[in-house]
Image (cartoon, rainbow, N blue to C red):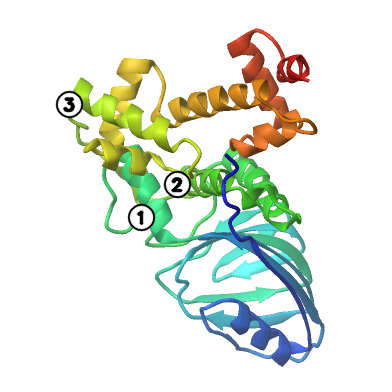
Amino acid sequence: MTPTPVEVRRDSVRSSGLDATVQLLNRVYPNRTRLVGRNRENGSLALSTAEVGTVGADRSRLQMHFEAATDPWRDLNAVWLIKGRLGIDEHALSAGDSFLYSIKEGMHFHSQPLELIVVRISQADVARAAARHYGVVPDELWPTQGRPISRAMNAHWQTLSGFARRTLASAPSVAENPLIAGQLVDYVASSMLAVFPNATMQLSHVPSPGTVGTATVRRAVAFVEANADRPITVEDIAAAAGTGARALQYAFRRTFDCTPREYLRRVRLERAHRDLQDAVPGETVADIALRWGFTSTGWFTRHYRETYGRSPGATLRDNT
């Protein structure tokens, strides 16, 4: 069964001049931007946006100097500065830097000609990731703005930003597959928790997840088996089983030596195996891999070979 595609929304806009640039930013983003200081230089802004569900990745090319202030941001936004310089409050960013905008206070920024990618996601998605990984959600995950916690994490955010932008901007996009769209949300949310300083990093005690019985695990497995073709999350599986996401993680580790997400991936790999055996003329390995949420044919081939002792191409050829 092929999942029903989801909409990947894209737009590409351009402005010329300071006033038009501010108007454009206010049209695209929900927080209000206004000019401050002395702004006399004209120039242009080219902005292309792409989003699926609650996650987006936008690319901006600014050809001017200007100074502005914004209202607080509603969603979490993290920038990767590709070229140029950007000042955000007291922080001076150079090419290669990453930065998470504050969601509690307005932002003052001054920019030179630059190019950047902004990855944005809802606070609710990141809170769900925090609950899944830590069992609790601090009252204020991000009371302030900040840079990545290390150079390695800054490099990771660059990789994530480029991947998210390419995935969403390409048309057609693999993110039209709801299984892949759900994975992208999880990837961005979990990475944001790992990359930028936040309250989960100061947790002194993580509550015990509690005990999960075999009947609960069986309910979780049955839900996965029945819904593997849908964009289900760990929270969905836990709710169907009648437990919490973190407790389910522990139970699956104990029972299957894997996480619920890894178990779901195993089930989808097995379904892809069946589809290869039953493929209709003209179907390719890439078609079937994508149907089950595997964006990388290389990854799919490697794990398929490890599981079934042969390549997916060999299975497909046996059927034709």
Q: Quadrant of residue 2?
A: top right
- x, y (%) of residue 41? 79, 88
- Which of the two discs, 3 and 2, sits closer to the camera? 3
Disc 3 to disc 2, C-alpha distance: 26 Å
Give the number of marks.
3
* Secondary structure at numbered mark 3: loop
Tag of residue 211 = 3
Q: Nearer the viewer, mark 1 or mark 3?
A: 3
Q: Nearer the viewer, residue 222 or 150?
A: 222
Could one spot residue 205 in this view of the protein? no
Amino acid type, callout 1: Leu
Residue 119's place in the image compared with 11, above or below, is above
User: Badge 3: how crowded within 10 Å, few (<14), some, or many (20+)?
Assistant: few
Given contact means CB atoms under 8 Å apart, are the residues at marks 1 and 2 in contact? yes
Residue that badge 1 annotates: 141
Q: Earlier in the sequence, mark 1 or mark 2?
A: 1
Q: Quadrant of residue 180?
A: top right
Residue at image point 47% right, 42% down: 194
| Quadrant showing the N terminus | top right
